[in-house]
Image (spheres, grey):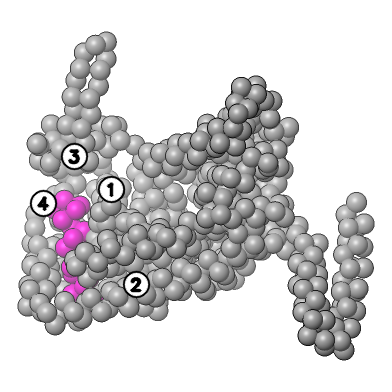
Amino acid sequence: MECQECHQRKATVHLTQVINGQKTEVHVCEHCAKDKGYMSYGEENFSLSNLLSGLFHSESPSTFKGKQAHTQQQTPQLQCPTCGMTYQEFARIGKFGCGNCYETFDERLNPVLRRVHSGNTTHDGKIPKREGGHLHLKRELDEHKSNLRQLIEQEEFEEAAKVRDKIRTLESQFHEGEDGEQ
Amino acid sequence: MSLQQFMNEALSPWMKQDGPDSDIVLSSRIRLARNFSSSPFPLIASDETLEKVLDFFKEEYKGQSFRDYKGFEIVQMNDLEPVEKRVLVEKHLISPHLAEKPKHSAALISENEQVSIMINEEDHIRLQLYFPGFQLDRALEQASQLDDWLEEKINYAFDEKRGYLTACPTNVGTGMRASVMMHLPALSMTQQINRMTPAINQLGLVVRGIYGEGSEALGNIYQISNQITLGKSEQDIVEDLHSVVKQLIDQERRAREALISRSGVQLEDRIFRSYGVLKHSRIIESKEAAKCLSDLRLGIDLKLIDHIPRTILNELMILTQPGFLQQYAKASLNPDERDVRRASLIRERLQLENEE
């Protein structure tokens, strides 16, 4: 079938419109479909967010099994205090309203994040330099602590004592940092 | 003046350089999504908030430089004609999504066009950095430094547990999308790529064509990128992508060798026929142009054709998109007119190479 607009290319986009009971069919090629506005640039994004919001919806019956009537009443109450986004709205569009939404909807996020990120729910990458200052210390501390455990298991006490001293210095720095922030 | 530069040349300055494995890998890209901690995300933010974010960037970064990335220029979406936005999308300097958001959205682009920082896209900040060829590690290192540079003045939305907070849950964590653009003609001709895609998907990576719709990849150009952004470090994500791309490169080289040894004349015939079509046709659709350009590029890589630079594929793939064609014609063109224009533009461009 040839495109009914340009009569040159093959029609690959087929649309059926029903307006007031009147049915019209459109057969056009990709070019003309874009030109005439039958297809839009953003379509891909749109379908992705649709797909995502589908994930959120499918979440509720399994998570709140048996309490469905309850859930439906509860859902509207969960609302982000910072931006006003409700959980329902979030589930519909599949997008957060602000950074604080993550905390507000926290307990419902894990199943969704697990699906999207192959089972992962917590961050294991970069920490911002300035803002995450005390987190850097914390990560370093955690590393030293696991190192210490290993050294003790291997009975390398001399080395372990050195690491323990390092941990003490870091810990005092860490607490100073926390006090400073408050 | 700078906008003129972004508009006129199909090839960004960095694209003209060769990188490692650039017979197969056209470019490597790192994209980071970041947000201001104190403002709602662009989707629901008020006009005032969006304006504040944009003004902040204009004030702090306009005309600034960071290391190799000099002379950052702000390009505001509401100053642009539709065709100009289209050209920037075709050059991959902005996303289609940004082009559709005229209000208070912009891109901060470095002179060499290697860095583009989109402002008020889906997130407040989308930083992207390109390198020619296969240079993911370098791209990650530099992108991270640019990120630190921005963080000196910006409080990012960051959470210890969830990482960098983004509007879409598919980006949360590292906020990073690493991708590699590859030309895989031999794997496509032999249908091998279709068999490899499911396996690659299982590793949390996505393979898709960047030109064309659905599963077909126009010009045999594919983009491989990570899907997962949470629970893995940036280095691990890049390493995984790196090892898959390395294997694809090896497979593509092997497939090319096999094609030459099994059907050398047929391959040569196909390449030179395509070259002929590009050189002489008067009407050419984008699909046919893409196929012929891919063949021509393969011919250059296999040293069957030696007087044309490799970059012709990237250049003409971009130059023959609807936006660029209309920018050159200085007029709006219907699809038929574009096909004629496309053919003449390709002929002229190839003629240029013959004269040199």
**Quadrant in which residue A120 is drawn:** bottom right
User: In the drawing, does residue A93 fall left or right of residue B276?
Assistant: right
Percent position of residue A17, x then y:
25, 21
**Quadrant in which residue B67 is drawn:** bottom right
> Residue at position x 13%, y 62% from top?
B278
Crowding at dot 4, Cα within 10 Å, few <14 / some 14-19 / many 20+, comes out as some
User: Label 1 amino acid?
Assistant: Glu
User: Label 4 amino acid?
Assistant: Ile
Instruction: Name the residue carrying label 2.
Output: B248
Image quarter in which the N terminus of chain B is found: bottom left
Instruction: Name the residue carrying label 3.
Output: A12
User: Label 3 amino acid?
Assistant: Thr
Instruction: Name the residue carrying label 1.
Output: B213
The chain ID associated with circle 2 is: B
Label number found at residue B148 = none
Magenta range = B283-302
Q: Is residue B316 magenta?
A: no
User: Label 2 amino acid?
Assistant: Leu
Label number found at residue B283 = 4
Instruction: Single out the mark in the foreground, 2 or 1.
Output: 2
Residue A161 vertical placement versus A95 (above, below): below
Percent position of residue B56, x then y:
66, 47
Q: Quote the CA–CA distance across marks 1 and 3.
A: 11 Å
Crowding at dot 3, Cα within 10 Å, few <14 / some 14-19 / many 20+, comes out as some
Q: Quote the CA–CA distance across marks 1 and 4.
A: 22 Å
The chain ID associated with circle 4 is: B
> Residue at position x 10%, y 69% from top?
B270
